[in-house]
Amino acid sequence: MLELLLKGFWSGIAAVGFAILFNVPKRTLFPIGALGAIGGLVKFGLMYFGVGIVFSSFVGATVVGIISIQMAHLKNSPPLVFSIPGVIPMVPGAFAYRMMLGLIALIQLEDSDTYIQTLIDMVNNGAKMSFILMSLAIGVSMPMLITRKESIKRSKFNKEKKVTV
Amino acid sequence: MGQIVENTQTVGNTLLEVGALLMSSGASTHRTRVTLNRIANGLGYEIESLITQRAIMLTIIEEDQKYLFSRLKRISPLKPNFKMVSGISHLSWNVMEEKWSLQQINAELDRLKSLPHYPRWVLLTTVGAAGSGFCYLFGGDPLNMLVAFVATVIGLFVRQEATKLKFNPYLCVFFAAFVASFIAGLSELFGIGSQPDKAVATSVLFLVPGIPLINSVTDMIDGNIQNGLVRAINGLMIAFAIAVGLFTSRMILNF
């Protein structure tokens, strides 16, 4: 359990690091850290209860996407300012690395038995990596597409001023 | 009459600048188009725009169709800057609601462009901390995390310096990935920490092309398939540059 909380904490740190790399406004730094931590907690929490890594990543990214829309209202910044740094801690770097190593090994191997095993591992890691990446990207942009029939601020604006844009 | 022509031109140039700034700061195509339309409508113009990854084309339509403005502007390569995206979003609403004039818009654009980035040491340390965070998430121990921190900081420094020397952007990523994974790979050589391979894997993660890949999916779902494909391929090329950097350092260390 403590490990889970620590994972959430370090996810938040990773999100803040990327937020600074992307030069976000200062007022959004803390929310982004919290968002990264929540996303990490959801993802690793689901994995803790035995859910597969692809689906956990998808749910985590969706939660980040939904909360980032609320944050956009609160902090007056577009949702992508929150959502992109928020999902980056879930990037499947380890699988990508293992796939790379497998690829390098394949170039050098001659023996057919180990060759097949290495090939299987590589394809497995590569498939996991690409599906996690896809589920992250789709999960984080879905909430925005569903709630944004037009624009976050426009719905409020039209009611007040009756302007057709 | 000359006044109208002049106005149309200055408005058009400002709009082009706004579009180029948004695209190069990391906004999606849909957001760029909506923002341009909003500002143009706020100033009382109708526009049609063609937005691609590296150039933007804009036509202003006057009410009486007498004066035409149509111009193409190059967009500089992606340089993530969410302060700009956020600031221009505010600006567009101010134009709509507070009826900002063109002078006010230009003044605000100048102010946004002059906003400072975070100081370099803040950038290096927080991104380094992010690297060690990744290392923890993948199961590294405190020593591995320290290695990932050092490797990330040096890698980011190399990338910044290479960018200053105006190397090809993919080459900058390659240099950074090579140096970072080489430093982390040394820990594998000397047996620092329990899982040095985790440090190597996470030392290059600060280079992941998050904005191109996520914006690519957003763009494609929005129907901007062409831009989505360009972004996806850009993201893949960055990923490939990281892979080649890792590959090179592994080859040298395993030699």
Image (cartoon, coloured by chain):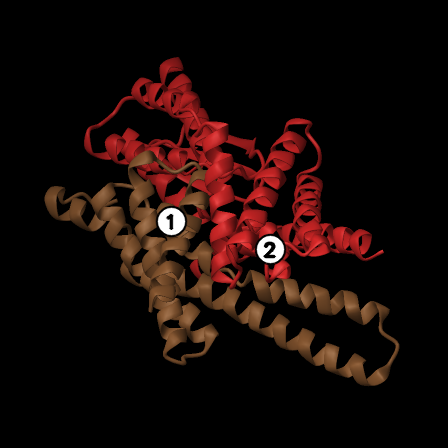
Q: Secondary structure at mark 2?
A: helix
Expressed as whole percent of the image width and height from the top left, the position of residue B156 reads: 59, 39
Residue A80: assigned label: 1
Residue drawn at 43 percent across, 75 percent down: A55
Q: Which residue is mark 2?
A: B199
Find residue A42 and report its horizontal and vertical position in percent: 34, 67
Q: Which chain is red?
A: B
Q: Is residue B84 above or below residue B193?
A: above
Helix, strand or loop at label 1? It is helix
Q: Residue furthest right?
A: A110
Residue B6 in sight = yes
Q: Is residue B55 above or below residue B253?
A: above
Name the residue: 58% across, 64% down: A94
Residue at the far bottom: name it.
Answer: A113
Q: Position of residue B88 (x, y in %)?
A: 35, 34
Q: Quadrant of residue B192?
A: bottom right
In this rendered view, identify the residue nearer to me: B83 or B121: B121
Q: Are marks 1 and 2 on the same chain?
A: no
The amino acid at mark 2 is Ala
Q: Amino acid at mark 1?
A: Leu
